[in-house]
Structure formats: C-alpha cells, structure tokens
Image (spheres, grey):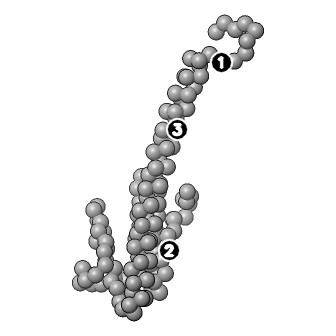
Amino acid sequence: MKRDAEQGFTLTELLLVLAIVGLLSLGAMQRWQQRQQLRDTAQQLQGFLQGLRAEANWQNAERLFWLRPGERWCLGSGPEPAEGCAPGSVELSNESSTLRLIISARARIRLCQPEGQQYD
C-alpha cells in the first residue's frame, strides 16, 4: 500500500479486520447463549422445587415430586408415579455445559456445577 506522510489504516483494511473478528466471536457468542439457556432452565427448576417445598411447609403436608428421565424428560408434582420420590439430583446439560440440581433428604435444594467446569 502506498503511504505518504499520513499514518493509519484504510477503510478496506479496517472492514477486513472487523469481519475476521466478527467471525471468530460468533462461536463464542453461541456457546455463551447455550450456557445462559441451561442456567435459566436450572434456575427455573430450582424455583419450582423451592415453591413446592414452601407449599408443603405452609400446609404441613407431604408434596410429591416426580421425574421421568429420557430424551424428552418430564417433571411435576402430585400423584404421578407409583414409586414416589427420593432424595437425589437432576442433571441438566447441553453442548456447552452441565449443571446439577441436588435435592437433599432434608429438602435442601442447591444448584451445582461438576468439578472442572467454570460457572458463568
């Protein structure tokens, strides 16, 4: 490129750099969106379980929680399964991350991430 006394870049060079940066950041943005969707889903599930626990405490009654795992999983409360509910965990995952919702025997509900993964 021919340069005289002026310093700087041409419009074409700047547009090329912006296009390259945009293409490189596209993958990171998609991964961030997937993590946000997973985190929102896990927090909604946590809120559902906390509401179910609060209702059981308010009415001093037992409330059952059931989960049908699989490709298209389903969960709810009420008299659905024959075997009932036991303490345990529900693991949610997608291409970018994994989150685990842990339900203790004393009805403590917490959201955790497996070791080695960063929580955004």
Q: Which mark is residue 9?
A: 1
Q: Report the mark closest to the observer, 1 or 3.
A: 1
Circle 3 SS class? helix
- In the depicted view, which residue is nearer to us: 22 or 113? 22
- Image marks 1 and 3: residues in contact by CB distance under 8 Å: no
- Image marks 3 and 2: residues in contact by CB distance under 8 Å: no
Q: How many marks?
A: 3
> Which residue type does callout 2 highlight?
Arg
Quadrant containing the C terminus is: bottom right
Location of residue 48 (image quadrant)? bottom left
Q: Position of residue 95 (x, y in %)?
A: 42, 52
Location of residue 78 (image quadrant)? bottom left
Q: Residue furthest right?
A: 5
- In the depicted view, which residue is nearer to us: 48 or 95? 48
Q: Is residue 44 above or below residue 50?
A: above
Mark 1 or mark 3, which has the lower sequence index?
A: 1
> Which residue type does callout 1 highlight?
Phe
Real-space CA distance between mark 1 and mark 3, rounded to the nearest whole angstrom = 22 Å
Circle 1 SS class? loop
